[in-house]
Image (cartoon, helix red, strand yellow):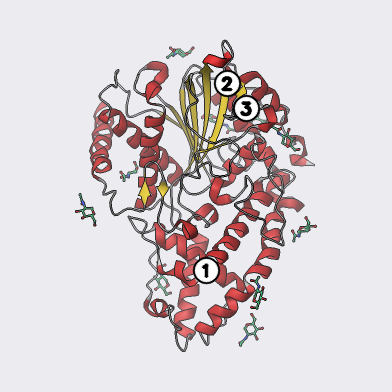
Amino acid sequence: MAAMATIVLWYLVAATVRVVTANTTTSCDHVNSGYTCSPQISHYWGQYSPYFSVGQADAPVSSDAVPEGCTVTFAQILSRHGARDPTASKTTLYNATINRIQSSATSYGPGYEFLSDFEYTLGADQLTTFGQQELINSGIKFYQRYEALARRGEGQYVPFVRTSGEDRVVESAQNWTQGFHAARVADQKAVGTGGYPYNMVVISEDTGSNNTLDHGLCTAFEDGPDSDISTNAQTEWISIFTRNITARLNSNLPGVNLTATETIYLMDLCPFVTVADVNGKMSEFCGLFTQNEWRSYDYYQSLGKYYGFGSGNPLGPTQGVGFTNELIARLTGTPVVDETSTNHTLDNSAATFPLNRTLYADFSHDNDMTGIFWAMGLYNKTQSLSNTTVQSVDELDWYSASWTVPFAARMYVEKLQCADHRGEELVRVIVNDRVRPLETCGGDQYGRCTLSRFVESLGFAREGGDWSSCWS
Ligand SMILES: *[C@@H]1O[C@H](CO)[C@@H](O)[C@H](O)[C@H]1NC(C)=O
Ligand SMILES: *[C@@H]1O[C@H](CO)[C@@H](O)[C@H](O)[C@H]1NC(C)=O
Ligand SMILES: *[C@@H]1O[C@H](CO)[C@@H](O)[C@H](O)[C@H]1NC(C)=O
Ligand SMILES: *[C@@H]1O[C@H](CO)[C@@H](O)[C@H](O)[C@H]1NC(C)=O
Ligand SMILES: *[C@@H]1O[C@H](CO)[C@@H](O)[C@H](O)[C@H]1NC(C)=O
Ligand SMILES: *[C@@H]1O[C@H](CO)[C@@H](O)[C@H](O)[C@H]1NC(C)=O
Ligand SMILES: *[C@@H]1O[C@H](CO)[C@@H](O)[C@H](O)[C@H]1NC(C)=O
Ligand SMILES: *[C@@H]1O[C@H](CO)[C@@H](O)[C@H](O)[C@H]1NC(C)=O
Ligand SMILES: *[C@@H]1O[C@H](CO)[C@@H](O)[C@H](O)[C@H]1NC(C)=O
Ligand SMILES: *[C@@H]1O[C@H](CO)[C@@H](O)[C@H](O)[C@H]1NC(C)=O
């Protein structure tokens, strides 16, 4: 056992060497800004965008910097796994679409020639190397942001890590700790042992598992009449926005007669082929579509999330209640009160759910994070999404899948002690570097609420959401 642990330790230390030497000149991905190549296109791929720093342009809060006079006393990251290959079912469909084009096209229009000898080599479900690096970068960024806490490196300052059990999520958690540790090693002011590699709580995704990082227990949500809402909303929108695109593709690929669904597959291949490249070099598929078409695509993916796990679905936000109640427990240092998807065995034990840490990291999926954001009410004041027109993306503080749950998405929840609020702890929530205004608890110009008002605003979660409707 001891020998085994040593091997793991050395293996991870060896792996961090690659972190430090990664060539940042050629990669489209960067520790602070995330994915920066062709932002007019790559930031409009819904949940298939690689993480990018959303920034504060037009946002109610002008900076994500820690406000002057404040110190951070607690930080939680909730992260999506990094960029991956398509799911197994999709990878088969994408390959079939390529095969069909190659066997039936009688010619290829200008810009479409690459399709004639494009070789489909994408795998299924697992992180790509680019996706692993995204999480390493996220670990570095988190360390640097919370350096004053992270560098203390012992006891309560060692990050407490939990991950949902699917391979790509567990691996993401490991890659994140690699980055965090590499930043710590590079920090000359770091003290303590660091305690790396960190223990992790891995929560099973098996059927019937109580897992606040992966939905599945709420029967009416999974299988009930409303479980098709998001597909229906997307179908409506596909029929509107793909018509002209499909006509253009078909005129450039005579003999093929692509369907609207296959148009979506060709659009999907743009992000997936891009993140299969180690540097995230933009794939040729991306150039088949215009900037406006990518906006429509982003909207299509956003509809899926909004009507799947947001307020467009009667039971969507309820899926995020369990994690929200765990967050309240961590913020307040009191035991978890929840009768939804929490596992009481795990949450009642200090070994698997300690309440005295200052740094917490949880790893999950886009859908689950969407449910959690809506359970917390983070987007309650944004416009609802119509299934027939793209709403203005840049004019208002906006809900979109690419801004909220891209690959390697991350929410930070911070507690602050501030000179202008003596004695009262404050909370801030930051999603992909954009500060949420927290209007729901009286957020101030920095997006800060007092801890007590923040917890008070989470009545929806504290009351269990609509969990009782899961079996009606
Ligand atoms: C990084 O990439 C740039 C541009 O391709 C190249 O000039 C440089 O030598 C590379 N550096 C390393 C360390 O590989
Ligand atoms: C794609 O389909 C072709 C033709 O059926 C097959 O030979 C190839 O192995 C498939 N590629 C992948 C990566 O599944
Ligand atoms: C946290 O609490 C647990 C259980 O009460 C205790 O065993 C542990 O020593 C505490 N850790 C720190 C860093 O205070
Ligand atoms: C990411 O973590 C996995 C699992 O620990 C490891 O195999 C892989 O090498 C890591 N990626 C990088 C780029 O270090
Ligand atoms: C709760 O967690 C324990 C400890 O990991 C596990 O044995 C048990 O199967 C879990 N129960 C459910 C319902 O998920
Ligand atoms: C589209 O939205 C309208 C208005 O919200 C709603 O009545 C209709 O059911 C939706 N259609 C689909 C297919 O979701
Ligand atoms: C499709 O093309 C027609 C003719 O150019 C144009 O009038 C219409 O607005 C386009 N529709 C969409 C959804 O872009
Ligand atoms: C293309 O396929 C559709 C069914 O998806 C069919 O209605 C249409 O006639 C086909 N067009 C051509 C030119 O083959
Ligand atoms: C799992 O969740 C169900 C539904 O809320 C609950 O009845 C059960 O007690 C939970 N099991 C554990 C081990 O926490
Ligand atoms: C967000 O809106 C929902 C639905 O109206 C409501 O139940 C919930 O309490 C709101 N959340 C917050 C934090 O205000």
Mark nearest the camera among 3 and 2 is 3
Q: Which mark is residue 426?
A: 2
Label 1 sits on a secondary structure element that is: loop
Can you say which quadrant of the picture contains the N terminus?
top left
User: Residue 291: where, in percent of width, then height?
Assistant: 53, 64
Picture quadrant of ligand 8: bottom right
Q: Which secondary structure lies at badge 3?
A: loop
- Residue drawn at x 42%, y 17% is 156
User: Is the residue marked by circle 2 packed among few (<14), some (14-19), or many (20+) residues within 10 Å?
Assistant: many
In the picture, residue 274 is in which quadrant? bottom left
- Expressed as whole percent of the image width and height from the top left, the position of residue 69 reads 48, 19
The residue pinned by badge 3 equals 444
- The picture places residue 75, in percent across and down from the top left corner, at 48, 26
Distance from Cα at disc 3 to Cα at disc 1: 39 Å
| Camera sees residue 339 | no
- Amino acid type of the residue tagged 1 in the rendering: Thr
Q: CA distance from mark 2 to mark 1?
A: 44 Å
Q: Which mark is residue 290?
A: 1
Badge nearest the viewer, 3 or 1: 3
Kind of residue sitting beneath label 2: Leu
Front residue of 55/165: it is 55
Disc 3 or 2, which lies upstream in sequence? 2
In the rendered image, the quadrant that contains the C terminus is: top right
